[in-house]
Image (cartoon, rainbow, N blue to C red):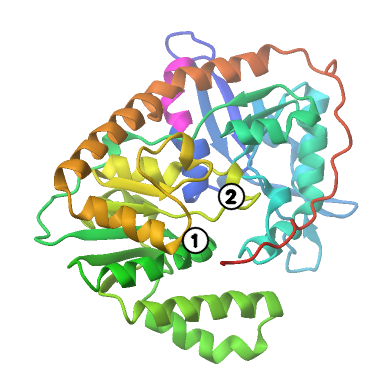
Amino acid sequence: MRQASDRTVHRALGVIGDELTGVTYVRFDQPFRHLREHGFELSTLGASLTLTRGAGGYVPDPRLLDGVALLIFPQMIASPRLPDGSRLDVVEPLCDAAAARGIPIVYSVDDALDRIETHNPAYETIQGAIANLGVILARSDALIVTTPELARRLAGLRRPTHLLPNAIEPRRWTLRPRTSGELRVGWSGSASHLDDLLLILPAIRRLQERIEFRFVLHGLTCRPIAEEVEEIGRLRGGLSASRRARADAFLEMAGILRAIRHRHVPFGSLESFFKTLPALDLDIGLCPLLDTPFNRHKSALKFYEYAAAGSMTIASAVPPYASEVSALAANTVDAWRDTLERYLGDREARETELRVQREFVLAERSIERLKSRWAEALTAILAAPRGGRASGPSPKPIAPAAREARRA
């Protein structure tokens, strides 16, 4: 394939849908838009997915790989059941077709899925994708990971592994307006981090007894918390034990919030996120994280987003934050209360930390700075010989990590 400049374009097929999620934006859309100048472009499955009938169900037409130089899988793919009862199998047929054509297969992973705890909201979904995960791990020619911990975790597979940290796109962000007229402390995240949020709410409640500030909660759901509580009340009796436990944790969180001066902003679209987070006008953004095997392999993306929005971050003194964030708190109620109190009472300290944090993020975690590393990694994957790599050990089945206490 040639452009007007006669430069070779390497087309990658990302096995993702056309509609972006937070994960596919950060790991596929964002980097590949910046890789065009290096001769890479991205295609996705959604608009071009043509199916053919196979022995076990419907499979993607192998012509999807026409003109493709790289096949890249995200960290998790399910095999959904179709209306006729058969399953749509994407992973193994695409791996077979790619191997037949000499197209390198890349696994882009952002979490240690084999370490997920049974109470994590994504646990059932991941268990439903175990077979596909095993195939991807066995068939991949190279890995792209986001943290050193993940690289070490997957070293036993003996695949070329490229460490490409998660990043932000500074030009898409606006800075917070600083016009709220009040001190604001905030948390932004999904329901998968509900246990982390519960870790800090008691500290917020105690601190509000003597310091005037508002707690801003962004996300968790796409609707008001009261509506979510009402829905849980209607459905709780029919939930599985694990889902009931998560519903009860949500109800506990909602109960604690009633004693906290707060504002809740539900999730909106991905596109709106780049303006919504700055508009919260947070003096301090919080990144609590329980110290679990699964969490230790995560990236510090939330910290990068707070910094991009112009809000100082306080984070748990655990990986991944401990090595990147300048203001840390131990995972106890007293430590979080004391650390918050220090920064709420000292504007100069907040501004100093914010400068340090933004300088790090803009220098080390901007896609503009990292795009050349992406290009070098993809070029190396394309240049590696096919079919001659050492086989890694057969991947072990993904099993639940030992369940850890949700909180002390």
- Residue 146 position, x and y percent, is 56, 34
Inter-mark Cα distance, 2 to 1:
10 Å
The quadrant the C terminus occupies is bottom right
Where, by quadrant of the figure, is residue 221 drawn? Answer: bottom left
Q: In this rendering, is residue 367 above or below 240?
A: above
- Residue 341 position, x and y percent, is 26, 57
Q: Amino acid at mark 2?
A: Asn
The residue sitting at 60% across, 30% down in the picture is 148
The residue sitting at 28% across, 32% down in the picture is 356
Image mark for residue 81: none
Where, by quadrant of the figure, is residue 175 drawn? Answer: top left
Looking at the image, the residue that sits furthest to the top is 6
Q: Specify whether residue 66 is painted magenta.
A: no
The local crowd at label 1, few if under 14, some if 14 to 19, many if 20 or more residues have their Cα within 10 Å, is many
Residue 265 visible, this angle: no
Q: Which element type, helix, strand or loop, lies under badge 1?
A: helix
Q: Do callouts 2 and 1 mark residues in contact (Cβ within 8 Å)?
A: yes
The majority secondary structure of the magenta stretch comes to helix
Q: In this rendering, is residue 274 above or below 57?
A: above
Residue that badge 1 annotates: 196
Q: Amino acid at mark 1?
A: Asp
Highlighted range, magenta: 31-38
Q: Specify whether residue 35 is painted magenta.
A: yes
Residue that badge 2 annotates: 295
Q: Which of the pair 403/300 is nearer the observer?
A: 403
